Amino acid sequence: MGAVPSLRLRTSSLSSATCTWSAPTRTSPSPSSPPSTATAASCSSASARRAPSSSPPRAPPRRSCARRTYVFASRPPNALVDALLDGGADVAFAPYGEFWRQARRLVTTHLLSARKLHSLRRGREGEARLVMAKIQGAAAAGAPVDMTRLLGSFTNDIACRAVSGKFFREEGRNELFREAIDGNVAAFGGFSLLDYFPGLAKVGVLTRVVFAKNSQLKRKWDELLDKIIDDHVSKASAQEQHHKHDQQEDQETDFVDVLLSLQEEYSLTRQHIKAILMDMFVAGTDTSYIVLECAMAELMRKPNLMAKLQAEVREKTPKGQQMVTEDDLASMAYLKATVKETLRLHPPLPLLLPHLSMTECDIDGYKVPARTRVIVNAWALGRDPGSWEAADKFMPERFVDVVSPDFKGRDFQFLPFGAGRRICPGINFGMASVEIMLANLVYCYDWELPDGMRQEDLDMTDVFGMTMRRKDKDDGDGSRFN
């Protein structure tokens, strides 16, 4: 399968193992790498034009965008969204309007609230414990560990537990979900002929050819999600209390239970429920494991930073405790800074989901017409030398200061999750999984590069698509679960 990276393990004085990270050697930069210039956004409309020089001074573009988040709150039409998500029946791709407002309110209030996030804590800690046990088993056997696959399974299983209240290892459905998620990432990261030449949609034969693979992907998602929903409907029929939306919901019910209980209140169809669940699976799996993999790779290149993080995590975790718990994370400032620095250098979505301007507006002297497709380059913003000292250097210390930029959408030089009305509603869900896993990886194990491998040999080449992954050492296509 060509997975990357892997581990070689040796016994250690730290009750577990010393881990050796095996990774591909450095190659020439990928031709698909984004430009080095820091462009805040690009517009697909050719009619975007510079205002005459006699115009009064304009506000900086980031301030302009901050004041106009409503203008860019919609999504452009997308043929793939029409095929997979029934025209935007979800939250991520739905156009701005009453349905999107209600769907987002449902997600933020009932699925991703602080209370619900806390109720899922046991599942996150349990999954982290399982990963540590797998690494320990490999250490005892002297076997390599495919960390890409292991971290991907961790984030996928967290999403499965939150969405459906169970894991699918025994049934093998977790593998099917990973395949479906990879299918979405590949589809949305590719070129869609119909988006650029919508008139071709009238050519029936061409449309069927273009969407043959996407139709197969749609059927796969329908089969997986219909099975989950049907199981919950049967359970609800057998247990009348699941029809009630009471104070026990956040402690006892999963996302499917919640959505079914709110069908009438929010006028949800089964297609709405499946589209929202697809959002949860894709956003909750792919982005989190990318952050974890990139964080560990960067720390392997900088042993002094790895040692600094380990010192903090081991100092802040109560003595005698076998693993880090979520109660211990609040005081780990350097851990949080490491995650932020990883997001700055390696945003999971290098180009944020496209926005659509709903009215004409002015940004830094440019007239942006209504219905212009606007794409924010989060990768370039995070590496802008005008905003960051040593912009291409991995330095978590830049985020230790209490006044350092945050990723909640208020600092326009740092937008890994977007900003404004369309900011990702699952930030805290994803960060909880990333922090508990990263903390335990550095707490339980000592890490080093293989014998003879230099820090500069560790390949940090990124492969760009809908999400940004590290280059695969065998075929370079960025695939991880093939």
Image (cartoon, rainbow, N blue to C red):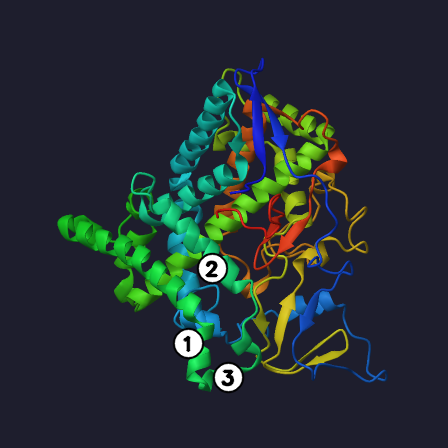
Task: State which tag comes first along the sequence, 2 or 1.
Answer: 2
| Disc ID at residue 200 | 3
Determine crowd level at label 1: few under 14, some 14-19, many 20+ residues with C-alpha closer than 10 A.
Answer: few
Residue, disc 2: 184
Q: Nearer the viewer, mark 2 or mark 1?
A: 1
Q: Is residue 216 above or below residue 179?
A: below
Count of number-bearing discs: 3
Question: What is the x, y in percent for residue 137?
Answer: 45, 23
Q: Secondary structure at mark 3?
A: helix
**Contact check, label 3 and label 2, Cβ < 8 Å:** no
Question: What is the x, y in percent for residue 20?
Answer: 62, 26
In this view of the protein, which residue sits in the foreground, 344 or 168? Answer: 168
The part of the image, by quadrant, that contains residue 168 is: top left
Q: Secondary structure at mark 1?
A: helix
Q: What's the amino acid at mark 2?
A: Asn
Mark 3 and mark 1: Cα distance apart in space: 11 Å
Q: What's the amino acid at mark 3?
A: Leu
Question: What is the x, y in percent for residue 333?
Answer: 63, 35
Mark 2 and mark 1: Cα distance apart in space: 18 Å
| Disc ID at residue 298 | none
Residue, disc 1: 208
Q: Residue furthest right?
A: 54
Q: What's the amino acid at mark 1?
A: Arg
Task: State which tag comes first along the sequence, 3 or 2.
Answer: 2
Q: Nearer the viewer, mark 3 or mark 2?
A: 3
Task: State which tag comes first along the sequence, 3 or 1.
Answer: 3
The part of the image, by quadrant, that contains residue 341 is: top right
In this view of the protein, which residue sits in the foreground, 350 or 335? Answer: 350
**Contact check, label 3 and label 1, Cβ < 8 Å:** no
